[in-house]
């Protein structure tokens, strides 16, 4: 039996071989409003002081012809989000203090806690996309063996991984200074991120 890491590596290899066109990716794109969630600073996870987590449920419906991970990566890239990676979500609470992040579910499902101790857990399934403003805590609580995320970042910002109490003071000074992205990772210039992150 293959481990979940072997499954994820295999899925990433397949995605690299079968690149879909943006037209094929955007055709099944579902027009919908994101759910918005604000989380408070819990003493370890600062979360963003102003901007909410945006959760697009079943934003993409994957056809048999499209590799889901490649489709998400193509969509994110088309909308100006890059530096994509394929994997899962860390099983410990963490956040990024100098960059925003989007997580698109390609395969499998998972319970992911957003916002830290006082946050909220969500059951994520294929086609769901979570857009996390800098500072938003996230942690995988459980997942199926085939769970695969495509993560991506806007052009602006520097990746960092914060999880310890000593990261917090610097994070509080940097989170609010991370600029708003130029486009929504799912819907581009027409996406709700631009009006909801002001």
Image (spheres, rainbow, N blue to C red):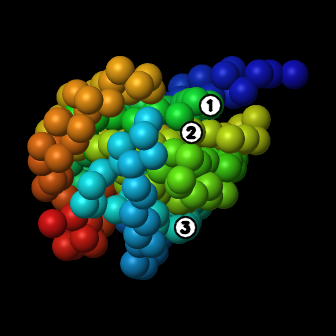
Q: Is residue 70 visible?
A: no
State the SS at label 1.
loop
Mark 3 lies on residue? 58
Q: Residues within 10 Å of mark 2 (few under 14, many from 20)?
A: some
Sooner in the amino-acid sequence: mark 1 or mark 2: 1
> Mark 1 against mark 3, which lies toward the viewer?
1
Mark 1–mark 3 CB contact (< 8 Å): no
Residue at left offset 77%, top offset 21%? 3
**Quarter-of-image position of residue 13:** top right
Q: Residue 104 appears at what percent x and percent y?
A: 48, 50
Q: Nearer the viewer, residue 150 or 172?
A: 172
Sooner in the amino-acid sequence: mark 1 or mark 3: 3
Q: Is 59 positioned to the left or the right of 122 in the image?
A: left
Q: Nearer the viewer, residue 104 or 113?
A: 113
Q: Is 69 positioned to the left or the right of 187 in the image?
A: right
Q: Could you tell me how far apart the alpha carbons at marks 3 and 2 are, in whole angstroms?
A: 20 Å
Mark 2 lies on residue? 139
Residue at left offset 51%, top offset 45%? 116
């Amino acid at each position: 039996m293959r481990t979940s890491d072997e499954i994820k590596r295999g899925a990433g290899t397949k995605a690299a071989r079968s690149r879909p066109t943006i037209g094929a990716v955007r055709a099944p794109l579902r027009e919908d409003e994101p759910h918005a969630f604000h989380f408070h600073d819990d003493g370890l996870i600062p979360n963003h002081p102003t901007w909410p987590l945006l959760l697009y449920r079943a934003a993409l419906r994957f056809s048999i012809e499209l590799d889901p991970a490649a489709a998400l990566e193509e969509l994110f890239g088309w909308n100006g989000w890059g530096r994509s990676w394929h994997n899962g979500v860390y099983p410990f609470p963490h956040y990024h203090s100098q960059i925003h992040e989007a997580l698109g579910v390609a395969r499998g499902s998972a319970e992911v806690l957003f916002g830290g101790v006082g946050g909220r857990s969500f059951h994520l399934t294929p086609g769901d996309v979570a857009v996390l403003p800098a500072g938003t805590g996230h942690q995988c609580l459980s997942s199926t063996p085939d769970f695969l995320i495509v993560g991506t970042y806007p052009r602006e910002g520097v990746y960092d991984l914060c999880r310890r109490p000593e990261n917090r003071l610097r994070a509080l000074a940097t989170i609010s200074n991370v600029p708003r992205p130029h486009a929504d990772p799912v819907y581009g210039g027409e996406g709700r991120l631009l009006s909801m992150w002001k």
